[in-house]
Image (spheres, rainbow, N blue to C red):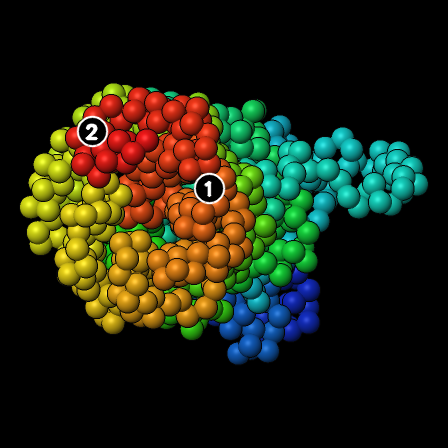
Amino acid sequence: MNALAQSVEPAPLPVSVPLLRTLVLCDLVDSTALVERMGDQRATDLFRKHDRLARALVHRHGGREIDKTDGFLMMFDRPVQAVAFALDYQRALTQLNDNEKTSLASRIGIHVGDVLTWDNAPDDIAKGAKPVEVEGLVKPIASRLMQLALPNQILLSGVAHSLAHRAQGELGEQLATVRWRTHGRYRFKGIPDPIPVFEVGEEGYAPLKPPPWSGKAHRELPFWRRPATLGIEIGLLVIAIAIPSWYLLTPAPAIAFANRDWVVVGDLKNLTGEASFDEAIDTAFRIGLEQSRYVNVLSDLKTRETIKLMQKDPDTIKLDRAVGSEVAIRDGARALILPTIAEVGGRVRVTAEVVDPNTQTTVWSESADGVGSDSVLPSLDRVNQQLRVRLGEALATVSKDSRPLDKVATKNLDALRAYSLAEHAYTAGDMSSSMSFYRQAIKLDPEFVLARVGLARSLVVSDRKDEASAELELAAKSEDRLPPRESLVVEAWQASLRGSPLAALEKWKLASSLYPDFFAARGLYAYFAWQFANRYDDETIDAAKAASSPKNPYAPASLLLLGTLYVANDRFDEANVQFDLARKGGMAWNVDYTFADAAQRKFDAAQGTLAKWTSSGVAARDIDVAFRKVLIAADRGTWNQVWPQLDEMKHNVMGLGVNVQHRLALLDSSLRIAIAPDTLDQKEMRALFTPIVEALTKASDTNRADVQLDALFAAYLAARQGDVNQAAEILAAARPRDESYPVLSKLFVIADSERLRASGNADQAIRSLKAAVDGAELYITHVALMDAYASAKDYTRARAQARWLADHRGRAYAEYDPNRVPFDVIQSTLALLDAAEYAQAGADKAGAQRSLEEFKKNWPNADELPFVKNRIKKL
């Protein structure tokens, strides 16, 4: 009895340690019915083939067979191995069906968790036990997932999906066809907590749709989607339909976005791991969104400036939800847009979230998918279009005003990145680097026309106008590869550089009208209206004001221009306000800041401003400062300082080019003609002016107008000095081709009128000059008109012109052409002496005395000038 009892005593149970494993349960659908149809023998052969291919696949993917009934229970170390097995298994099963002319279908459940495993003793195996046992909650959950699945469907739990999806790159070539789907949370009978259910499969093999409910599993739905509430919902729907249709069809956006509101674009969140996407996609996103006339995008430079005001480093901080929201609030932007690029299920997905900066919550998001990097730009286009429509822009406008990104940008991501770096260098003021990066972008993609436009812009800023014009000409030939706004910019710049100012002003004005917050167009319209047309009217001032918006990163330049326009209108206090704002905005120093003080004869303040200048090392810039010092010394009548400074300038300009030489020749001759005409004979004057005329024959289209302005001023001075023959020769060589350049045409009339006056035709000169007085006339027009009236012995009108000259010193300082400014400024004081002479000629001795006293007050050292001294003696 003891021996018998000892023989049946069970062996000690093996100790099992919990292990994290992935279980796969696969089951053949309706296998019993299949046996009935095929018969035992044929069905057995089919199942054996099925089992062999299944076991081969388990071995290939590093799994282990645990149990076998109608299907298999298998165990894998990692979820991605299980998914790879399941995908190959479904594909192999399809192939088996094709070969055997059968319709086998399987359903598969995959779950991850802790399992207890142990090996059975050999005796137990001999008695029918499995070699390996597996237990744990993972097993029934995998079973429930398998039972829920449709035929040929692979279902995963949430944790299995998360781990497998993260490692999907290991699926290799399969990845391109694999699709991942989420089907919501399901409640399974016997399992207390709901389980998120996901599906993985390949198109053509898997159903890729939610599995149906059953008695053992049902999908968890919110209260309002439960059957018990459907009646209520239907009733509410009927009520909703009764609401006026227009109200339903035009819902207000979650953000109260209006036409011309601003958005901040945050830094791209790149989840693909592809570094080439970082700056390239961010730039492309901006290019696409900036095509809108409805949505305004805060510039990258302005964003960086705001981050600096937040006492953060824009080079290191990410413009994420928190930082971007603060920037938007500070700059008055309505929304923050956060772009993201990710790889999802083998596809590249571009997403843009619209964030309310006040709450930092996502109001809505738009996304688009594609396959491969070539799909990114078309996806960006779709996202941009969806965003603009959601923000309130009409779909028809979006379609009309936009061109595809892969056409206006470039498919070459390296070229797009070079363009992005060029834009950053340009905004930082590094023109050399910006030109290098633009050229690299063009080299990588010769059809990247937007990069060519950027290169032209950098060349213009670097005063390389001929090269800029050549780039613009190439860009214009591929106009269809530019956004509509940039196409208009190319036309405007071409007209600006090639001597067609009226056409340029029309183009800049059109761009300003179509894109009211396009600050470059507003600022350049104001600038060229000042330069080309000598305009100081309200329209020009309003354009400069618009361009000086705090949202414009280049606002200081427009503030400087606005101050100059105010000086021209003798609104000196307002001018100084704009100059101070320009200084605070980053334009720490500029010679134009002296205008308002000097025009009011606050010479100490003006010279104090100039004294703050230290040598920049740039000869042309330093000469400009020296030029202003000579101007102010001459204006205050300290001629003992003027001539030494002028001699020093003559020495310093050696080797600086013919333009500077011409400028100095005109400065020297105009000052001598004004206060010492007897020191300049016709021979010396011809020697000074002949090189200017000769330069006309060598001038290119882009600088011919500048040389013409110099030559026409020289013609005026020659005629004033009495050399009508030289004046006529210069006028013939420098005659404008047409009237498309207002300042050039006006200066030609002035020079020609002075020739007429010097030839004894004062009345004809008066008629020409009076026709030129239109509010935008040049200051020198009134000098010539005063002299013409005096030659005609109309001293009353001559005296009125002299008074105008003395009362409009702001205009004398503010005109664009620096070659005429010294002569104009000197005339504003000499006009007082002229007025005294004309009053005396008109028998107004008291008036003559008042004007003379005013002149002496402004030029107390006038007696040092022999020519002026003789005029005073005659009074």
Residue 350 falls left or right of residue 185: left
Name the spot of residue 723 as percent of width and height, x first.
26, 61
Q: Nearer the viewer, residue 329 or 468?
A: 468
Q: Nearer the viewer, residue 384 or 351?
A: 384
Name the spot of residue 872 as percent of width and height, x first.
28, 31
Residue 691 falls left or right of residue 442: left
Q: Nearer the viewer, residue 9 or 686?
A: 686
Q: Looking at the rendering, in which quadrant would you find the C terminus?
A: top left
Name the spot of residue 316 as percent of width and height, x first.
29, 32
* Residue shown at 59% from the left, 58% from the top: 401
Q: Amino acid at mark 1?
A: Tyr
Q: Which residue is mark 1?
A: 795
Q: Is residue 674 visible?
A: yes
Q: Looking at the rendering, in which quadrant would you find the N terminus?
A: top left
Residue 221 falls left or right of residue 791: right
* Residue shown at 30% from the left, 37% from the top: 826
Q: Amino acid at mark 2?
A: Asp
Q: Rate crowding at label 1 as few (under 14), some (14 to 19) or many (20 or more) other CA atoms within 10 Å.
A: many
* Residue shown at 39% from the left, 57% from the top: 757
Residue 396 falls left or right of residue 87: right
The quadrant in which residue 346 appears is: bottom left
Which numbered dot is residue 863? Answer: 2
Per the image, label 2 sits on a secondary structure element best described as helix
**Mark 1 vs 2: CB contact within 8 A:** no
Per the image, label 1 sits on a secondary structure element best described as helix
Q: Nearer the viewer, residue 375 or 703?
A: 703
Which numbered dot is residue 204? Answer: none
The quadrant in which residue 473 appears is: bottom left
Judged by depth in the image, the label closer to the viewer, 1 or 2, is 1
Q: Earlier in the sequence, mark 1 or mark 2?
A: 1
Name the spot of residue 381 as percent of width and height, x first.
53, 57
* Residue shown at 42% from the left, 27% from the top: 845
